[in-house]
Image: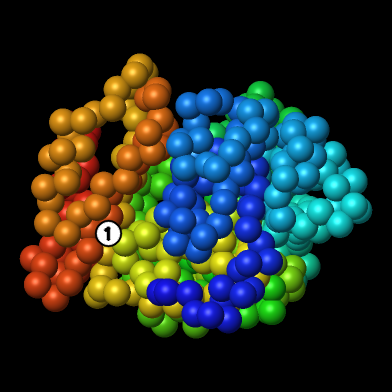
Amino acid sequence: MKMNEEEKKQQNKIQRVGVVGGGQLAWMMGDAAKKLGVDLIIQTPHQDDPAVSIAKDIILAEIDDPQATTKLANICDVITFENEFINIDELSYLAEKNVIFRPSLSVLKPLLDKYEQLCYLRYLGLPVPNFWEWGIEIEPLSFPLVLKARRHGYDGQGTFIIKNIESLKSQGNSEFFIQEFIPFEREVAVIAARGVTGEVKVYPVVETQQENQVCQRVFVPDENLELVTEIEEIAQTLLNSLEVVGVFGIEMFITKDKKVLINEIAPRTHNSGHYSLDACEVSQFEQHLRAVCGLPLGNTTLKVRRAVMVNLLGYEFGENYYLTKRQMLEKIPHASVWWYGKTESRPGRKLGHVTVLLDEENFEIMGRKGEAIANKIENIWYT
């Protein structure tokens, strides 16, 4: 999708985008920034973080360092976020000085604490599992339960399946909250974007499969078509209620009786949308920059019939670029291998991903959901 003259005029108002966080999500904004003629200035703690390689400039500092974000604000037209590990209270004085955050701090405030996030979703009338603040007496107490960290939990960290009262007492504290365990039929996710004019674009609903509470596979689009309209309406309601500017990822459960329940909201680009780099007209990363820069949102349409995305997770401690395995993966027809350039591997760490596009030719061969190709990728990677 090329920029027209009107878009170029609008984009010229915002030339330098500050990004708080320098991991793979910021790194994957690089190609989109180049396409849109935008400079990315990254605040990140380490010189070898993935996004350093694509940044116009960097500020080496911790994500939650407000002095560093002040420096970022002084040299950027707008600031956005790669992750949620920020301190809103420390940044509020910048918003008072008319520093532009997209999404805004007021949008992020009810979402960063996952207990408060569920409270907000319930307030909007959106479907969520039952949940309780730590210390509240639950009657009747039925196991298993889910114990979740209120802040800084990701990729399965800070989430525990609790099977008895002894485990609950030993592991829980005020930094956690309790959520009912949902024996779901499937997990799904959707990426949605909202622009400065209130325009909303929703990407295809996808099925996600987790291993050890880390996203392992994404199948595009999801097969459960009868629920797509409801899921899209949930995304529209959420983004419009918050007046979001940017991209959000929304993870949901589909229960055995075909009900939709929101699991979590990620107020940023999200792993479940990485397939869009190869499979959609406009990726979630370009979409996010378009929203942040005040440009019209792009087309979310799939370019192919279906796609499969598989995360490449670390399975050992050490420094390993897995070059031979990556070369084997690149030989899979219609495959794109995205490698994040991280210098250290550890079990469960996201090191890259592979997306395979399924057109009419290979759709039937690979299976209705692409299970065969996902198995092939994992057999190469984990063997």
The location of residue 302, given as percent across then percent down, is 34, 74
Does 135 appear above or below 251? Answer: above
Camera-side residue: 50 or 129? 50
Asked whether, in this view, residue 79 is left or right of residue 228, the answer is: right
Q: Give the residue at x 15% y 38%.
A: 327
As rendered, which of 344 and 115 lies closer to the eye? 344
State left or right for residue 234 relative to residue 259: right
The residue indicated by pointer 1 is: 308
Instruction: Give the colour scheme of this rendering.
Output: rainbow
Residue 307 in percent (x, y) is at: 27, 64
- Relative placement, left or right, of 71 versus 163 is right
Closer-to-camera residue (174/281) = 281
* Image quarter of the N terminus: bottom left
Residue 172 versus residue 10 in the image, above or below = above
User: What's the residue type where badge 1 is placed?
Assistant: Val
Total marks shown come to: 1
Q: Is residue 237 visible?
A: no
- Residue that sits furthest to the top in the current view: 318
**Residue at 53% across / 26% down in the picture?**
47
Along the line of sight, which residue is nearer the eye, 300 or 363? Answer: 300
Give the quarter of the image for residue 171. Answer: top right
Let me know if residue 84 appears in the view.
yes
Q: Residue at x 31, y 61 (%)?
A: 278
Picture residue at 59% right of the left edge, 39% below the top: 57
Give coordinates of residue 66: x percent, y percent: 79, 35
